[in-house]
């Protein structure tokens, strides 16, 4: 059988440490034997980011805007220890943050369902995908302590600094604290468009929870913007796709999620998403089975694994030890990108290959062959689990592909 041809390239963003090692293996064993792979390659490994003063990250994000689909390997976000380890010119910013800013996108995290690895919430049969707004609220807050006898006000000035409105927050009789938060209509609108675009792409209903009954201006603005954009730009397409949009109070959303069978996109404000994404991820089990995609409001997609570069395994790999690092989320980044490329280019062979590859991965694990992280989570009657090294595991998956 000939290899599948591609018309438009995918933006390929290489990364660091153990995931950089997995990247090669995944490509060599599962992708390039089947696809005449066309990518525009950017090396986001820390050495290259340092060499180019992080220009390479910016270029890769701009390429994603141009080509519409990217696949990204996990990358190191440098801290003081990494600056020393790699002798960096600067403590470069998180590449994910830079790419997200340039694409103005939202990150969606979805667990990869496998029979034998059950979520801790027994009713969850389908994945729950979380969308977290990544701007504003307490993450860009201004706060201070106030002393007894002091008063705090919310003051709005016009562009010349003339006071327009003033509201008393509190006249402190004893010592206390005060916080000012903000958000932007533009950011909330982009967030809404990214969420609705992703939901259409994945055919998932959308649930958005906030607290508009208490926060009658701030949270209510989120609710209104979502409602307006849904009505104006997405309602018809949602109805055609057989999905819906629902707004409810955040506490009601939490209760509904726990009682649901999954299969929804749960849209969260920044803080709710921070907390709830960790809760949902841990209930599903392993970081190695969590996929992630950044979606821009104008429909560009960047796929990656939710986990990092798995440094501890890389240290063992460097010593020549065989590691059993889970490549599934990295494979899902590739299949996500190939499928999306196929959809955008009307290349059904590419979409089918992505489906077959995912099926082969799931069948391999369900028949008992897996990486070490999954062993304590796997329980299936009549199946004795076998732990394989990463490369052997990939070879095992390949035996299920024609
Ligand atoms: P991590 O790479 O996700 O790994 C944390 C631990 O989780 C690992 O030590 C391993 O546990 C387990 N784990 C994660 N992925 C696994 C996989 N695929 N297979 C098996 N086990 C897996 O997080 P980290 O150690 O906090 O961060 C390492 C580096 O990654 C940092 O430099 C950070 O900046 C970067 N990072 C990048 C991204 C990204 O690019 N999106 C995201 C997060 C972190 P055991 O060691 O117990 O086996
Ligand atoms: Mg968190």
Image (cartoon, rainbow, N blue to C red):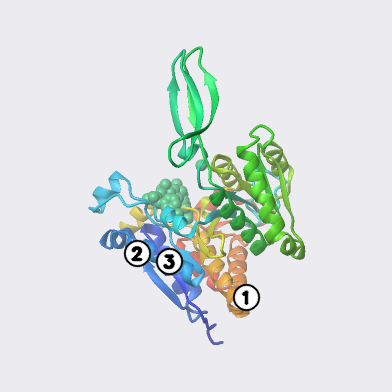
**Upstream in sequence: badge 1 or badge 3:** 3
Which residue, given by chain and number where applicable, does mark 2 sit on? 56
- Give percent across and percent down for residue 286: 54, 50
> In the rendered view of the protein, which quadrant contains the C terminus?
bottom right
Which residue, given by chain and number where applicable, does mark 3 sit on? 62
- Give percent across and percent down for residue 39: 44, 75
Residue 53 lies left or right of residue 27; in this view the side is left
Which residue, given by chain and number where applicable, does mark 1 sit on? 352
Residue 74 lies left or right of residue 173; in this view the side is left
Looking at the rendered image, the disc whose residue lies closer to the viewer, 1 or 3, is 3
Q: Secondary structure at mark 3?
A: helix
Using the rendered image of the protein, determine whether residue 381 is visible from the camera's viewpoint. no
**Upstream in sequence: badge 1 or badge 2:** 2
Residue 13 lies left or right of residue 276; in this view the side is left
Mark 3: few, some, or many residues within 10 Å (few <14, many ≥20)? some
Q: CA distance from mark 1 to mark 2?
A: 32 Å
Instruction: Tell me if residue 215 comes above or below residue 292 in the rendering.
Output: above
**Upstream in sequence: badge 2 or badge 3:** 2
Q: Secondary structure at mark 1?
A: helix
Q: Is mark 1 within 8 Å of ligand 1?
A: no
Instruction: Tell me if residue 399 comes above or below residue 229 in the rendering.
Output: below
Q: Residue at x 68, y 52 (%)?
A: 228
Q: Secondary structure at mark 2?
A: helix
Judging depth in this view, the residue of 67 and 49 nearest the camera is: 67
Looking at the rendered image, the disc whose residue lies closer to the viewer, 2 or 3, is 3
Report how many numbered discs are placed on residues in the image. 3
Using the rendered image of the protein, determine whether residue 364 is visible from the camera's viewpoint. yes
Q: CA distance from mark 1 to mark 3?
A: 28 Å
């Amino acid at each position: 059988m000939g290899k599948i041809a591609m018309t438009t390239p995918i933006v390929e963003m290489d990364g660091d440490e153990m995931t950089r090692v997995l990247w090669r293996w995944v490509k060599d064993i599962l992708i390039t034997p089947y696809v005449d792979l066309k990518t525009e390659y950017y090396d986001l490994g820390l050495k290259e980011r340092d060499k180019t003063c992080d220009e390479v990250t910016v270029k890769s994000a701009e390429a994603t805007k141009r080509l519409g689909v990217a696949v990204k390997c996990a990358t190191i976000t440098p801290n003081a220890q990494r600056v020393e380890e790699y002798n960096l010119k600067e403590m470069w910013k998180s590449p994910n943050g830079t790419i997200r800013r340039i694409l103005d996108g939202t990150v969606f995290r979805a667990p990869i369902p496998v029979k034998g690895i059950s979520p801790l919430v027994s009713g969850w049969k389908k994945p729950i995908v979380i969308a977290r707004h990544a701007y504003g609220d307490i993450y860009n807050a201004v706060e201070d302590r106030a002393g007894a006898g002091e008063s705090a006000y919310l003051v709005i000035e016009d562009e010349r600094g003339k006071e327009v409105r003033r509201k008393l927050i509190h006249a402190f009789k004893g010592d206390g604290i005060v916080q000012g938060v903000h958000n932007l209509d533009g950011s909330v609108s982009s967030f809404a468009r990214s969420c609705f675009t992703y939901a259409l792409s994945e055919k998932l209903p959308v649930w958005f929870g906030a607290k508009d009954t208490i926060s009658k201006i701030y949270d209510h603005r989120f609710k209104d913007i979502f409602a307006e954009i849904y009505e104006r730009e997405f309602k018809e397409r949602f109805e055609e796709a057989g999905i819906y949009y629902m707004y409810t109070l955040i506490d009601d959303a939490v209760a509904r999620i726990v009682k649901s069978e999954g299969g929804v996109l749960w849209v969260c404000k920044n803080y709710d998403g921070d907390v709830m994404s960790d809760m949902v991820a841990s209930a599903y089990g392993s970081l190695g089975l969590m996929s992630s995609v950044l979606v821009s409001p104008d429909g560009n997609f960047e796929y990656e694994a939710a986990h990092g570069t798995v440094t501890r395994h890389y240290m063992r790999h460097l010593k020549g030890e065989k590691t059993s690092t889970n490549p599934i989320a990295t494979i899902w980044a590739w299949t996500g990108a190939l499928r999306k490329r196929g959809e955008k280019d009307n290349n059904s062979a590419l979409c089918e290959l992505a489906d077959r590859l995912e099926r082969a991965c799931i069948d391999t694990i369900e028949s008992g062959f897996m990486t070490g992280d999954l062993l304590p989570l796997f329980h299936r009657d009549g199946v004795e689990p076998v732990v394989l090294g990463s490369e052997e595991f990939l070879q095992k998956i390949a035996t299920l592909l024609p």
